[in-house]
Image (cartoon, grey):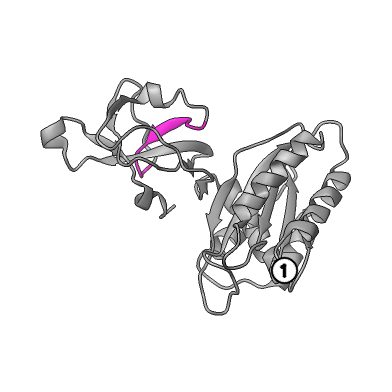
Amino acid sequence: MTYLICIDDTDMPGTKGTGWLVQELCKLLEQNKMADSTSPISRHQLFVHEDIPFTSHNSAMCFEMALQNNDIFQVIDFMAAFLEERSQKGSDPGLCVAGLDQNLDRERLIKFGKNAKKAVSSKEAAYDLAKETGIHLSEHGGTGQGVVGAVAGIGLRLSGNDGRYRGWYHLGMPGDVVRVDRLCQYPFIDQLVTPQGKSLPLDALVCIGSEKTKTVRLKERQVLVAVENENVKSSGISYRTITKEEAKQY
């Protein structure tokens, strides 16, 4: 069985972010054999508004977890204890767990996630949706407001077209020319695509846009985005990978 796990609001200003803490949790789940495997972590941007308390960016962190032999409720207890021990004092951690089976009401969860990107959502609405769709939702400190982002992150990950993956990648120096198939040899790149999601041919050449960049989630894949190259006349290369700054829009 595969589960989606989403965590929100574990940090405070000046401390390490939720992404760092979730990465530590993934390591512990595998090391302690609580999970068979965990996937790369995706970051999902939520609505930024004065009525929503958050530390810096108001984003939720989500990953997949494969589980064969262990009881999911024991794993949830393990994650809950971890959050209560490791989250920063003053934060409002929320935890959501959804089994990826045929009974999961993806449509309603996706709708909630998309709405949380543009409007204020309530704890009551998050709990009501969790109860009605049969997913786990719990709060582990402070006001527990992070449950809203935790449910929203599940929906946004399910949509397959939202978020960027945790980790900055060095793929070369700016201006370097690389074949698409070479970049796709990295385990964290499924394909190079345009911002519209069109795949670039494996034999195409692209320029490296900046020394560091991120992968993003499009069509349920971990992809590297390539945009039209401004220097195509001088370089002869039609596309370049997005820069570190451009990656922040996802």
Q: What residue type is labelled 1?
A: Lys
The foreground one among 13 and 52 is 13
Q: Which residue is drawn at 55% across and 54% down?
A: 44
In the displayed structure image, the side of residue 245 where residue 116 appears, left or right: right
The foreground one among 17 and 3 is 17
Indicate the position of residue 120 as horizontal and vertical percent values.
57, 73
In the displayed structure image, the side of residue 37 where residue 247 appears, left or right: left
The answer to if 77 sits in the magenta stretch is no
Residue sitting at the far left: 233
| Residue that numbered label 1 is attached to | 89
Q: Residue at x 42, y 53 (%)?
A: 248
Quarter of the image for the N terminus: give it: top right
Q: How many marks?
A: 1
Q: Considering only vertical position in the picture, is 211 above or below 130?
A: above
Q: Do we see residue 8 in this rendering?
A: yes
Q: Do we see residue 61 in this rendering?
A: no
In the displayed structure image, the side of residue 201 where residue 37 appears, left or right: right
Q: Residue at x 74, y 48 (%)?
A: 98
Indicate the position of residue 74 as horizontal and vertical percent values.
88, 45
Q: Quadrant of residue 237?
A: top left
Q: Considering only vertical position in the picture, is 160 above or below 245?
A: above
Q: Considering only vertical position in the picture, is 8 above or below 74?
A: below
Indicate the position of residue 14 as horizontal and vertical percent values.
57, 65
Indicate the position of residue 217 as horizontal and vertical percent values.
50, 43
Q: What stretch is highlighted in magenta?
A: 188-196
Q: Which residue is drawn at 11% across and 34% down?
A: 234
